[in-house]
Image: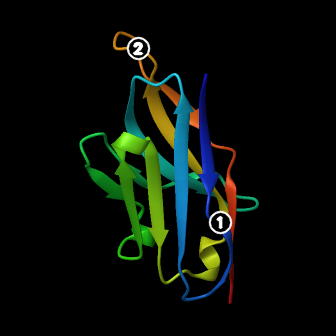
Amino acid sequence: QVQLVESGGGLVQAGGSLRLSCAASGSIFRINDMGWYRQAPGKQRELVAGISSGGSLNYADLVKGRFTISRDNAKNTVYLQMNNLKAEDTAVYYCNGNVQITSWSKGRNYWGQGTQVTVSS
């Protein structure tokens, strides 16, 4: 089994910063793409930022220049540094990882349980 566990959410004032972490554990051969998604009340889950196993990055337009995604492959961990937070960033943030449990198996997507980020204006 594979588990992804997020941490680092909380309450912050507008203009502040938070750093989210997501650690994967369990039977892992390799983690391919990893990413952060968010879901605000009444809205669909949306991609915030993604990072490939080779380090290629992509960001949603709304967070470009403010958020930075990174990963530590040795620790099976992905991070999201969020700066200059705005009230509209308030959401539950989920991490996602495409995990292979053996060298010959296809990757499967796993999700964390989510961590709440609340930005007060």
Q: Which quarter of the rendered picture does the N terminus lie within?
A: top right
Q: Which mark is residue 102?
A: 2
In the depicted view, which residue is nearer to us: 67 or 88? 67
For marks 2 and 1, the one nearer the N-term is 1
Location of residue 119 by image quarter = bottom right
In the depicted view, which residue is nearer to us: 71 or 47? 71
In-image side of 11 versus 86 (left or right) = right
Location of residue 86 by image quarter = bottom right
Residue identifier under label 1: 9
In the depicted view, which residue is nearer to us: 85 or 44? 85
Mark 1 neighbour class, 10 Å CA radius: few under 14, some 14 to 19, many 20 or more: some
Q: How many marks?
A: 2
Label 1 SS: loop
Mark 2 neighbour class, 10 Å CA radius: few under 14, some 14 to 19, many 20 or more: few
In-image side of 6 versus 51 (left or right) = right
Estimate the x, y position of residue 105 in percent, counting from the top left. Answer: 41, 12
Estimate the x, y position of residue 34 in percent, counting from the top left. Answer: 43, 43
Estimate the x, y position of residue 99 in percent, counting from the top left. Answer: 45, 28
Q: Residue at x 52, y 30 (%)?
A: 109
Q: Are marks 2 and 1 in contact (CB under 8 Å)?
A: no
Q: Mark 1 belongs to which amino acid?
A: Gly
**Residue 1, placed above or below residue 73:** above
Estimate the x, y position of residue 68 in percent, counting from the top left. Answer: 38, 66
**Residue 52, placed above or below residue 25:** below
Q: Residue at x 30, y 39 (%)?
A: 53
Outermost residue, front side: 74
Q: Mark 2 belongs to which amino acid?
A: Thr
Label 2 SS: loop
Q: Which quarter of the rendered picture does the C terminus lie within?
A: bottom right
